[in-house]
Amino acid sequence: MEIYKEIHLDKNSPQHLYMQLFYKIRQFIMDGQLKANEKLPPIRQLANTLGVNTSTIVNAYGLLEKEGFVYKKIGSGTFVSPRKDDRLEDVVLEKYPLDEDIRLMDRGQIQIKENMISFASATPTSDLFPVDDFKILLNEVLDRDKGDAFGYQESQGYYPLRESLVDYLKEINIETNSENVQIISGAQQGIDVIAKAFVDYKDTIIVESPTYTGAIGTFKSRGAKIVSVPILEDGIDIHLLEENIKKHHPKFVYLMPNFQNPTGYSYSKEKKLKIIELADKYNTFIVEDDYLSDLSFYNNDNATLKSLDENDRIIYIKSFSKIFMPGLRLGFLVIPKKIHHRILAAKHTSDISTSGLNQRVFDLYLRKGIWKKHIRYMEKIYRERFDVMKNCIEKYFKDIDISYILPKGGLNFWFSLPEGYDSNKLYVEGAKNNILILPGSIFFISQNESRFFRLSIAAVYPKDIEIGIKGLSQVIKRFIKKDTKERKGPDSYTPLL
């Protein structure tokens, strides 16, 4: 019973007690703290331990059973269900990479062999990090603040940094104040905090299709019903979006309007304004993940939704991982006033507060204007890679039967194989030739076989881009030819109709 004594149920929370208990026990199971076939406490015993009614335990156990986390034996009790390794459930064939390995690869957290060219990672190469500037600012903070730099900050974030971010936001036409800014430990935590604050089991979230795999995982972990709406070259399909908002009454809509991940597409001004209109019309929130609006190379309009938000409907997420240092885990939210308390409570339960030392250093980074110099540097580096990539695609992919729309900025390029082909298989062929792509399946809710794939320039130097794209073009040609033969078979016949 020791593990169950760690459970705290908040009777003042708007979330039902049985739902709180469901999430706690489910997490114990997913973390391996409760093993397969281990017996859960008897209902009355656990109710007494937690100080709740037996109906709370009954409802939580019932939901755990419905979701397959536990099973019941008549007369014996409730037991943890044996579960397949979650990492293997989405693998199409054993030879394909583990789903989780691909996710880690996307974040640059898997060591790539030295001779491999990786278009899979969207994490910048480490030589782009402003280490010298950071070192100077770090020492300045330590000399100034001494031990205070290592204390807990308030959960909402270091106040001077929030003030600095208000000034930063003015540069991109977002008017707010420090009370509306919430510091977070990276964009992924921002998505998680928002989900904790809003989403209960079976609530509906609307997302783009395809969309960021980390958001899919977070929403699924909350037990949400995820409705996906296709994204077009100029943004999400507005008509389908409105139909689904009317039908499902979502808790929020999650979007990346500028250089969307994974497609690289950007929304037109008309669609941005229409989304603001829909949020007002249907009284819903829009979560805007500002993934890469900083890297606009050939797009005249990279305005954020938040800059157009007059009625406080947009929850804005911004991370600096692609343009500063991903390992610092630093970002922020701009929050509508009416949900301050919910976001703050969710952040506090996540990690109490983001690193105070990192916040203080980044505050100086903004105040001294060093970030402007670094942004210009990153734009120059990434524009060079972007231009090389664009030219190589036009040169080497022109005679290949694949579809694509070249983006106008950002780091990602999105491709489609012919109908019926599987990019998971292409991944395998590419890896055999020391070229890594990212299969599109992880960016869709169903994660079925997909003909789409993503290439990113974040972790590839210009000299390697041409080698990689030329080599990949040859791999794709062989793959399409080989796969066509395999699907037809040696003795296939075309029927006469």
Image (tube, rainbow, N blue to C red):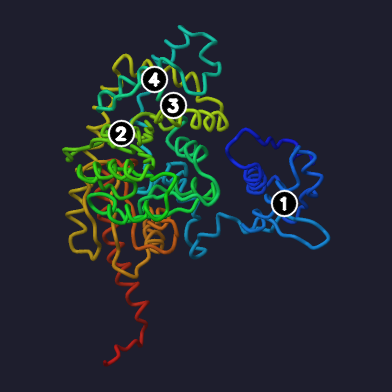
Q: Residue at horizontal 30%, vertical 37%?
A: 292
Q: CA distance from mark 2 to mark 3?
A: 15 Å
* Farthest-out residue, top: 144
Q: Which residue is mark 1?
A: 58
Q: In front of the other: label 1 or label 2?
A: 1
Q: Residue at horizontal 23%, vertical 35%?
A: 303
Q: Which residue is mark 4?
A: 178
Task: Inspect the image, locate mark 4, and give the three-letter code of the amino acid beneath it.
Answer: Ser
Q: Which residue is mark 2?
A: 306
Q: Tag 4's secondary structure? A: helix
Q: Nearer the viewer, residue 56 or 168?
A: 56
Q: Quadrant of residue 46?
A: top right
Q: Is residue 297 visible?
A: yes
Determine contact: label 1, label 4, CB under 8 Å: no
Q: Position of residue 90 (x, y in %)?
A: 51, 59
Q: Nearer the viewer, residue 329 or 201?
A: 201
Q: Which residue is mark 3?
A: 182
Determine contact: label 4, label 3, CB under 8 Å: no
Counting residues from the start of the chain, the first of labels 1 and 2 encountered is: 1
Q: Residues within 10 Å of mark 3 (few under 14, many from 20)?
A: many
Q: Tag 3's secondary structure? A: strand
Q: Quadrant of the C terminus?
A: bottom left
Task: Inspect the image, locate mark 3, and give the three-letter code of the amino acid beneath it.
Answer: Gln
